[in-house]
Image (cartoon, rainbow, N blue to C red):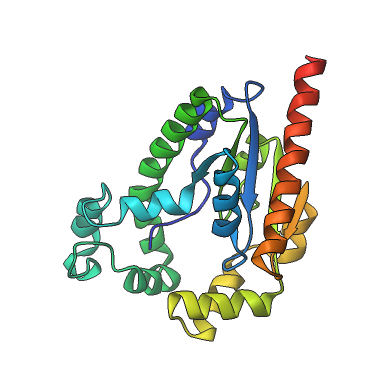
Amino acid sequence: MASNHPHANHTQTDLSSLKGKILLVGLTGGIGSGKTVISDLLDKLGVGIIDSDLISRELTSVGGEAIIPIKQTFGTEFIDAQGALDRSRMRDLVFKDPQSRQKLEKITHPLIQQKTARQAFELAQSGVPYLVFVVPLLVESEAWLNLIDYLVVVDCPEEIQIARVMQRNNMTRPEVERILMAQVNREDRLAKANFVIENQASLEGLKLEVQSLHQKILQIKDERLSSS
């Protein structure tokens, strides 16, 4: 399992050169809250999406840049038959052993940082109206909170999160609860939000919420331009 912990400071310094040139929006939420659904809907509206989860998965998929150093550090038993990271086995290891988590992060963080910055600058130059950084542990990172202009939190009741992740990832309830315990609680996450999207209704209802959010952010962008 590639780590999603906050990125190191030098990446934030790189990205900070975008601040003031394009609106920087953070998108976060607990596991199973529906961040990917929201970011996909925003992507269809022409927004620039940089998804750290997706980046980490690419890096640990077959042929990914992190595979060889992971194999060298942890052994071939952590690489599956197809040549990708055995995410389940790695997840178990890093939850039990903080030192192993640090070793994994030492491999994945610099690669995630480089790809995040590269995608952000490319999208900013492509003419998108604003950038959205999808980061699972954004609220836990002071660097990310200082970087972004606005924070969008995707929220739903914990029972819905648990049910979604159990079904999606074929995990047991205790496994999902263990992940939830490692993340910041809902109240703290919501307290830092500028916008909240409730994701527990129909897809059509969610589309309307996302379109409304998009219009609000575009309005903020236009107001900034007119006042500068």
**In the image, 67: left or right of 220?**
left
Quadrant containing the C terminus is top right
- Residue 68 point in image, percent of width and height: 20, 52
Q: Nearer the viewer, residue 9 or 186?
A: 186
Most distant residue in the top direction:
228
- Residue 90 point in image, percent of width and height: 34, 68
- Residue 28 point in image, percent of width and height: 62, 54
Q: Residue at x 58, y 55 (%)?
A: 137
Quadrant containing the N terminus is bottom left
Q: Nearer the viewer, residue 177 or 206?
A: 206
Q: Residue at x 40, y 61 (%)?
A: 101
Residue 193 in sight: no
Residue 49 in sight: yes
**In the image, 106: left or right of 164?**
left
| Depicted 155 relative to depicted 224: above or below | below
- Residue 99 point in image, percent of width and height: 39, 62
**In the image, 14: left or right of 163?**
left
Q: Residue at x 75, y 40 (%)?
A: 215
Q: Total number of numbered labels?
A: 0
Q: Nearer the viewer, residue 82 or 146?
A: 82
Q: Nearer the viewer, residue 183 or 155?
A: 155
Q: Residue at x 76, y 58 (%)?
A: 190
| Depicted 95 relative to depicted 60: above or below | below
| Depicted 160 relative to depicted 8: above or below | below
